[in-house]
Amino acid sequence: MRALPLSKALFGSAVVFFLMAPLFAILPLAFTDSIFLNYPIPRFSIRWFTELLTADAWRRSIINSLVIGVGTTVLATILGTVAALGLRGKSFSLLFGFFRTVFLLPMVVPAVVLGVGMQLMFAQYGLANTYLGVIVAHTVIAIPFVVVNVTAALQGIDHRLENAAASLGASPAVVLQKITLPLALPGVVSGAVFAFATSLDEVVLTLFVAGPNQRTVARQMFSTIRENISPAIAAAAFLFIVGTVALGALVLLIRQRSVRSL
């Protein structure tokens, strides 16, 4: 029996190493002075981070990613939160179960299928090759993450708190504003973080619906890999990972503070 915990620890460590080994192999190359992605590193430098900020293609892609990511986050958070509130407490309803499945479908539908469909639809409505079109496309795949996180937060709310506020004369709008949303805030923030990360990482939909002026960092990395492998890709990946870890730490901090406040 004592060997079981040890075997679990070894297996878990092996899985973590298998997942993290490619990152440990590529990230140090972000600080190389060479123009090639190879070891050993001749000399450490931040020249490729400088290129991300000075090269027109990379600088524009960073700005595009931030603009599209913020727009996607705002739109997906609002729509996903409203959807989660509307589906709240309707677990045993066949109709609401169908709508919940519809909201989660973008998580399982292949991105190529979504990209082709959106490209055809956006061309009819004049949204192809526009910032709004890319934001809408990213929002479609980001909404499920918001719905899942906000739904989980809403399920943890004690209904007696809302009933007590209503019994004291608070209107449904006041209960929502003063009780429900503040208690569900950690789920809303988590959903927003996932929506932003999803937008930054999405490349397939961007290839279908974005034009040359809407090239994001993910698409720029994809194009650079096809045209010319450069250590700038490793530098961009390094920033991606650091940003993701920072956002994850922010979510954990907000959740811990919310648990302490309760």
Image (tube, rainbow, N blue to C red):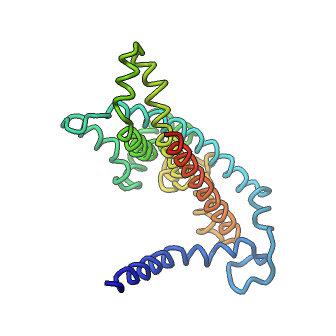
Name the one closer to the observer, 102 or 159: 159
Residue at image location 52% in from the left, 56% down from the top = 203
Name the one closer to the observer, 218 or 260: 260
Residue at image location 66% in from the left, 52% down from the top = 61
Please, is residue 4 above or below residue 146 in the view?
below
Residue at image location 32% in from the left, 34% down from the top = 88
Does residue 128 appear anywhere in the picture? no
Name the one closer to the observer, 15 or 239: 15
**Which quadrant does the N terminus fall into?**
bottom left
Does residue 255 appear anywhere in the picture? yes
Name the one closer to the observer, 14 or 47: 14
Please, is residue 85 above or below residue 257 in the view?
above
**Quadrant in the picture for residue 23:** bottom right
Please, is residue 244 above or below residue 38 in the view?
above
Q: Which residue is situated farthest in the top direction here? A: 169
Left or right: 103, with 30 as reference point: left
Residue 151, position as x, y percentages in the image: 37, 41
Residue at image location 34% in from the left, 46% down from the top = 104
Please, is residue 43 above or below residue 220 in the view?
below
Residue 188, position as x, y percentages in the image: 49, 39
Residue 48, position as x, y percentages in the image: 76, 67
Left or right: 214, with 162 as reference point: right
Residue 254, position as x, y percentages in the image: 56, 46
Counting labels gives 0
